[in-house]
Image: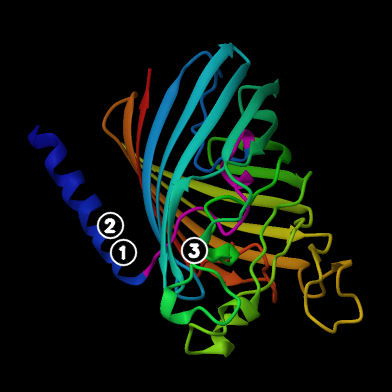
Amino acid sequence: MMKFFKPLVILYLLIFVSSEYSYGQGCSDAGFCTMGAMKPSQIYTKKINFKLRSAEISYGRAKTTLSPVITAATVDFTFGINEKTSFQIKLPYYWVSGNLGETSGLSDISYSFTKNVYSTEKFHINATLGGKIPTNKSDLDREVESQFLTTGMPEGTSVDLPMYYQTSLGSYDLVAGASFISQKWMFATGIQIALTENENDFRWGQWNNYVDTVSYLKDNALANDLKRGTDIMFRVERAFHFSKWDIRVGMLPIFRITKDEILDIIPGSPTEGQRIKLDNTTGLALTGILNVAYHFNTNNSINILYGQKITDRKLNPDGLTRENVFSLGYVIRF
């Protein structure tokens, strides 16, 4: 037990320092940057064997660019199907708290199949195909307190919360990607396509009677019947190995290449009641990544992931923007 004491102390200090300056989980994207071949910090071995299985339990806390604070616990399972093919499923649970209310629930379920398509003694090339299943329609709401009800609003009236408070993106998604992995480097790319719209119906006017700052409401972008644009990601990661320590630094650029689309519900707008494409929703979201892992043995390890947002898109109706990323995970392979 004593041989684990020093690394555990160092890991505790890393957690403490990081949590003082950062909040976050995920990678400010719709989830595909941790799926299959795109997953960070994959361990290179000369002989790949996907028949191995693994389970990771991780915990994170996120401060969004507005008031909501998000806490997340995720269980990530990978099952080997044969020596070259594996199946992954991720089950995240979210707790969200902000000045417009509180929500909690199972978040979107991710699944993927990954296949090793080419290998040499120096590198592997893997490919992934999968998707995401929504756990609700992005229509979680809040009941209006009786003292704020206006004439004509019945008791029990509820109004939709903005996307930052939603535990699901509310859409079925298609995900595909590939990676190149060697002893020192990882290069990955992927694409995520929203196949359906959500059913969010957050409206600024519904909240005007019982919040103090109308301008704050408008910081929450409208996402009525949102269909997200298509995302393309790239991951570059450099590994440094020190006995049982594994340190990786990298960059994660995500490009939204098509505009987000919503239903225009603004009264008096020339396009009221029509679907419109939103300007300023395309472009680059760039994150710098640091991952530190300690391997107790070949089957057990602890991972700490920290990411710092470098740049983001101007408008983010999906509510995915995070200033920082921090997560702690325990991995067991069996």
Q: Residue 177: x and y, percent?
A: 72, 38
In the image: residue 182, left or right of residue 12: right
Work out whether residue 119 can be spotted. Answer: no
Q: Within 10 angstroms of label 3, few (less than 14), some, or many (20 or more) residues?
A: few
The numbered dot on residue 15 is 2
- Identify the residue at the far right of this view: 270
Q: What range is drawn magenta here?
A: 22-37
User: Compared to 98, does 54 lie above or below?
Assistant: above
Residue to which mark 3 is pinned = 156
The N terminus is located in which quarter? top left
Q: Residue 257: x and y, percent?
A: 82, 59
Work out whether residue 125 can be spotted. Answer: yes
In the image: residue 279, left or right of residue 207: right
Residue to which mark 1 is pinned = 19
Tell me the kind of residue under disc 2.
Ile
Identify the secondary structure beneath mark 3. loop
Identify the secondary structure beneath mark 2. helix
Q: Residue 251: x and y, percent?
A: 59, 58
Tell me the kind of residue under disc 1.
Ser
In the image: residue 54, left or right of residue 198: left
Taking depth in this image into account, of 306 and 4 the one nearest to the observer is 306
Identify the secondary structure beneath mark 1. helix
Tell me the kind of residue under disc 3.
Gly
> Alpha carbon of mark 1 to alpha carbon of mark 3: how far?
39 Å
Q: Residue at x 74, y 59 (%)?
A: 226
The quarter holding residue 49 reads: top right
Q: Mark 2 and 3 residues: CB-CB less than 8 Å, in contact?
A: no
Q: Is residue 153 magenta?
A: no
In the rendered structure, which disc, 2 or 3, sits on the residue that comes first in sequence? 2
